[in-house]
Amino acid sequence: MSQLLNILISVIGWALFIFNTIFWHLVGLLIMFPVSVLKGDKTRGPVHWAAMMWAKTLVWLSPHWEFEITGREHLEPGKPYLIIANHQSALDIFAVLTAFGGHFKFLAKKELFKTPFLGWHMSLAGYIPIDRGNKESAKNAMMLAGKWLERGVSLLFFPEGTRSLDYQIHNYKLGAFRLAEEKNVPVLPLVIDGTGDALAKKSYILKKRSKLRVSIGEPVTPEKLGAEGVASYAIKVRELMTARLAAMRKTAE
């Protein structure tokens, strides 16, 4: 019976996802993109606002999800951050869009940009496509990411590079931390938990009840960590996030 209920919830959930995606893409295309052009806003901020509403609406329409956000007091409005988040599930982007509440861009595999409505909106919003395994594509993506930071727009990275199957935080790739150091932008460590339980990797089944939690930590700058190099910077941030994930899970017990 429980499995049948999960399947029913999944069918309803994916139907809501499709409807919600089409609706907010049309809002972005027909209203927010023209607003960006008329305002001369080259950062496409209004289009990103539609993406945030897309995520928040889906969370609101999903009564089987309980959403908890802590640490928003660490955010300084209008300040650009390099957001570092752990990666458990495809739902993580919903979590960040809902929790961060500000304008940011993110890197995503280029295949997603070809997805009807979802990918089209990603292109309109100015998110960054990357061809995994292609060094030239990665280089161009990081150059574009750097330009967004220079314009005062935050960036989101999942530095593990792929979703964690055991929901622990694994080793980080260093590209995001090099960029933070180069552009002198603080890293904002954002810990996500529960998304992997709600929607596991390579699964389309949504569980009947899930608690999604996001904990926003204090910004960390290279200066606070000394001159030990980018690798030490990444390790320090990962250790802080790993400790916070453990504390979140202990509190939830």
Image (spheres, rainbow, N blue to C red):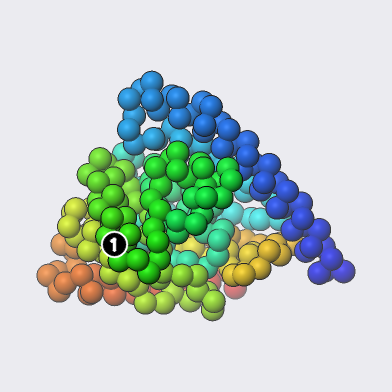
Q: Nearer the viewer, residue 15 or 167?
A: 15
Point out the residue furthest to the top here. 38
The number of numbered discs placed on residues in the rendered structure image is 1
Q: Is residue 116 visible?
A: yes
* Side of 7 where 14 appears, left or right: left
Q: Position of residue 242 (x, y in %)?
A: 41, 73
* Side of 116 where 2 appears, left or right: right
**232 shown above or below 106:** below
Disc 1: which residue: 136
Residue visible at 74% across and 58% down?
10
Q: Position of residue 29 (x, y in %)?
A: 52, 31
**17 shown above or below 208:** above
Q: Position of residue 192 (x, y in %)?
A: 49, 63
Point out the residue furthest to the right here. 1
Residue visible at 19% across and 53% down?
183
Q: Position of residue 118 (x, y in %)?
A: 56, 46
Quadrant location of the C terminus? bottom right
Q: Is residue 69 visible?
A: no
Local secondary structure at mark 1 = helix
**48 shown above or below 232:** above
Give the amino acid at mark 1. Glu
Q: Nearer the viewer, residue 229 or 244?
A: 229
* Mark 1 surroundings: few (<14), some (14-19) or many (≥20) residues within 10 A: few
Residue visible at 52% across and 33% down?
28
**30 shown above or below 191:** above
Q: Nearer the viewer, residue 109 or 68?
A: 109
